[in-house]
Every structure is written in C-alpha cells, then in structure tokens.
Amino acid sequence: MESIGTWWMWGAFAAIVLSMLALDLLVFKGGEKHKVSLREAAAWSLAWVTVSMLFAAALWWQLDGSVGRAVANEKTTAFVTGYLVEKSLAVDNVFVWMMIFSFFAVPLELQRRVLLYGIVGAIVLRTGMIFAGSWLITEFHWLLYVFGAFLVITGIKMVWFAEHDPDLAGNPLLGWIRSHYPVTERLEGEHFFVRRGGVRMITPLLLALVLVEISDVIFAVDSIPAIFAITTDPFIVLTSNLFAILGLRAMYFLLADLGDRFSLLKYGLAAILVFIGTKMLIVEWIKIPVLVSLGVVALILAISVAASLLHTARRRQPA
C-alpha cells in the first residue's frame, strides 16, 4: 500500500489521538456522569476542528519540504475533503444516536459516558476496516467500482427511506441479548452491569452502547468507501476519518437540541453519496479533481442546511 505516511508521521498521529483521549478521560472526566452544556459542546467542537486543521497545516508543511508543493497541495486537500465528507455523513449517525437515547430514556448526563466508549470502539473498528480496505483495493482495483455502485445505491435508498426511523425495538441483536442475558427493567445510574440476588445483570445503558456501536458499523460501511473515492492513501484516509470521528461526540451534544431544524439534511447527504459514487464509477473516463470534489461537497452541505433552516422557519410560522 503506497502512502506518504512515514513511521514518525504515523507515530505523531497516534500520539495526538491518544493524548486527546487521555485529556478527555483523565482531565475532563469524560467517562463520568456529567451533563454537557451547549457552551461546553461548542468549545470541544471548536477544539477538535482546530486540532484537525492544525494537523492539516502541519501535513502540508511537512510534505512541502520533503516531496514538493504539488504533492503537499494534493494530499492536504484530500485530507480536508475526506474530513468534511466524514463529518457531514456522521450527522446522520448523530440523529440515530438521539433516537437510541430517547428509546432507552438515557438522560443527557449519562449519554456522555456511553458515547466515550462508543467513540473508542469506533476508532478500533474503523482502523481495521480502513487497512483492510486499502489492502483489498491494492490487490483488487476493480473493487473501487463496486464501492462506487454501492454508494450510489445507498444514496438513492437514503432518499427513499428518508422519512422512516429505524426499528430499534425489533433489532435482532437486542432480541438475542434479551433472550440470553437478564436485563434490568430500568437504568442503574452509570453502570453497565449490576448484581441482583447473586445474578449479574446487564442494564439498558449497555444495550444503548451496543446500538451505538452497531450504528457506527453501518455508517462506516458508507463513509469509508466514500473517502476511498477521494484518495486511496491509507494515511490520509485514516487520519481524516479518525479526526472527524474524534469530534463526533462534541458535535452530538451541539446538535442534540437542534435535530428537528435539519429535516432536509438527509437529502443533502444522499446527494453527496451519489456524487462520490458516480465519481468512482467514471474515474477511468473523467477524473474529477479533489479540489472540485471538496467544492461540490461543501456546496451540497450548505444548500441542504440552508434549505432545512428555511423549511423549519416556514413550518413554525402561524397559519
């Protein structure tokens, strides 16, 4: 797998990720019961975006000095595009998390704990999926066309089922867990497991965590092929994907009270998937520059957000 990432660049990236997670967990007590305020969520969101863009600037500076300005511009633009694509597609994941927490009646002060473990699990999962995907594409280049067709079909399905919420009660994995393990009737504070009468029981908080992890698997199947449409360099794919994921928890709490204002965003995300899938399918005949892809993704996002806000404002006007 060809990559611009040297051993020390991989090491620096791992150090940044581990340091930020340690800061969140040990200094800011990210795994403890705590209600995240809008101000705190905004501060963390800004912090994650800032760290991501500083990484992009450092990447450009390193590549500019080692392999030249042209490569530096290309790889940094690919990183920013991949970051934006992952960040935008993750918005749909945020809305699913809202439904999961509502279904299990998980209060805001406990959601932070669930999402911390969910993000850590997502980092491990996506790292494995990205390296596996990079190897498969290197060995079987035609898989890019399969990914492209899959993204187009997924985008069309997203439009078709835009008004349908997932059936959480009928989830087969939850049904299997409930039939094999005793589950408490209500939440037990911040505990995932409790003992009742000498029997170890799981709590609905653990079921919520399971669904959070399942939702990330589902969305990773969409978002990872989308980034491979931008670049097949595993260093760029992994760093852009994980930086977007690391800021996802803060973005969740920032959007938690605003979900109903973005009712048309799913259509924009569907359009992004169809565009990226089409880009992969026509790559042998028409090569769309990464900078153009970045502009198209940003434009679709801006239009869908503006249309959502306008639609919400009109809907709330008195008849």
Image (spheres, rainbow, N blue to C red):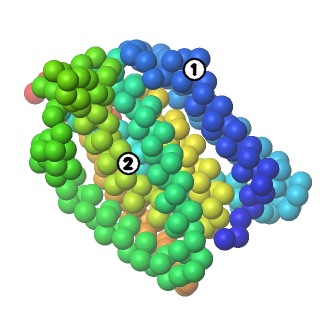
User: Label 2 sits on what residue type?
Assistant: Asp
Between the residue at mark 1 and the residue at mark 2, the CA separation in whole angstroms equals 25 Å
Above or below: residue 287 compared with residue 297: below
Query: Measured from the top left, where is residue 84 in percent x and y?
Result: 53, 48
Query: Residue at image x 70%, y 59%?
Result: 75
- Can you identify the residue that label 1 sits on? 26
Query: Measured from the top left, where is residue 71 in percent x and y?
Result: 78, 63
Query: Residue at image x 61%, y 24%?
Result: 23
User: Label 1 sits on what residue type?
Assistant: Leu
Q: Residue furthest front?
A: 198
Q: Quadrant of the N terminus?
A: bottom right
Choose between 314 and 184: the one closer to the eye. Answer: 184
Q: Is residue 251 left or right of residue 204?
A: right
Choose between 44 and 188: the one closer to the eye. Answer: 188
- Can you identify the residue that label 2 sits on? 216
Categorize mark 2 by other alpha carbons within 10 Å: few (<14), some (14-19), many (20+): many
Q: Quadrant of the C terminus?
A: top left
Categorize mark 1 by other alpha carbons within 10 Å: few (<14), some (14-19), many (20+): few
* For marks 1 and 2 on the same chain, the one whose residue lies earlier in the sequence: 1
Query: Measured from the top left, where is residue 276 in percent x and y?
Result: 46, 65
Query: Residue at image x 63%, y 36%?
Result: 18
The answer, for residue 224, to whether it is visible in the render is: yes
Quadrant of residue 190 within the rendered picture: top left
Quadrant of residue 309 within the rendered picture: top left
Element under disc 1: helix
